[in-house]
Amino acid sequence: MPGPEQIALLIDAENVSHRFSEQILCEVDAIGDRVSEVHVYGGKISCRGWMKALHHRCAKRTSLPPTGKNNRSDMALILDAILMPFRDGITHICLASSDTDFVPLLRRLKSEGCRTTIFAESKARRSLRQCADRFVLLRREVRAGRPSGTA
């Protein structure tokens, strides 16, 4: 009988707002096993809100200085995700991003026997929605009858 899943939550802070943190954490906790690692990837500014939201989770921040290249934090996330099952015994990767650049990563993780969950907004393309074991649609908070993004 296999042991409990070891879960890693990887957050693309440049692609998903920290305003979704409560929904994402509730969904991850509902999986039922222990979250072993929480990583936030992005620039210093994009990581700030996530680090506040995750202060009780001991999240690790991979903050890269801006260089004009958009995908530096994506590459760091991909490298960590590929290594985690081998290095840390992670059996389930939860990824918060609407970026289709991660489709090959998710397919590779699944082919290696790692379970995958993607948390993404409605703007996520079909290819991203279909490549993970589970897709969770992120919904805007509603306050006073209006989405949180409106004045």
Image: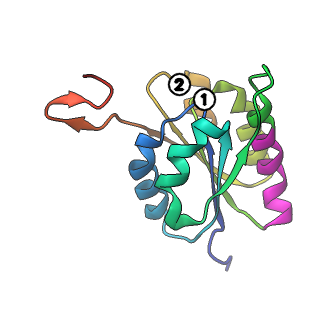
Say left or right for 145 vs 147. Answer: left
Q: Where, quadrant-wise, is the C terminus in this rendering?
A: top left
Label total for image:
2
Determine the secondary structure under disc 2: loop
Residue 128's tag is 1
**Residue pointed to by mark 2:** 124
Given the image, on which type of amino acid does mark 2 rest?
Answer: Ala
Say if the magenta span includes residue 63.
no
Residue 35 image position (x, y, % from top left): 59, 66
- Start and end of the magenta stretch? 76-88
Residue 49 image position (x, y, % from top left): 50, 44
Residue sitting at x 80%, y 50% = 80
Categorize mark 1 by other alpha carbons within 10 Å: few (<14), some (14-19), many (20+): many
The answer to whether one can see residue 151 in this image is: yes
Residue sitting at x 58%, y 35% = 97
Say left or right for 149 vs 96. Answer: left
Say left or right for 67 vs 115. Answer: right
Coloration of the structure image: rainbow
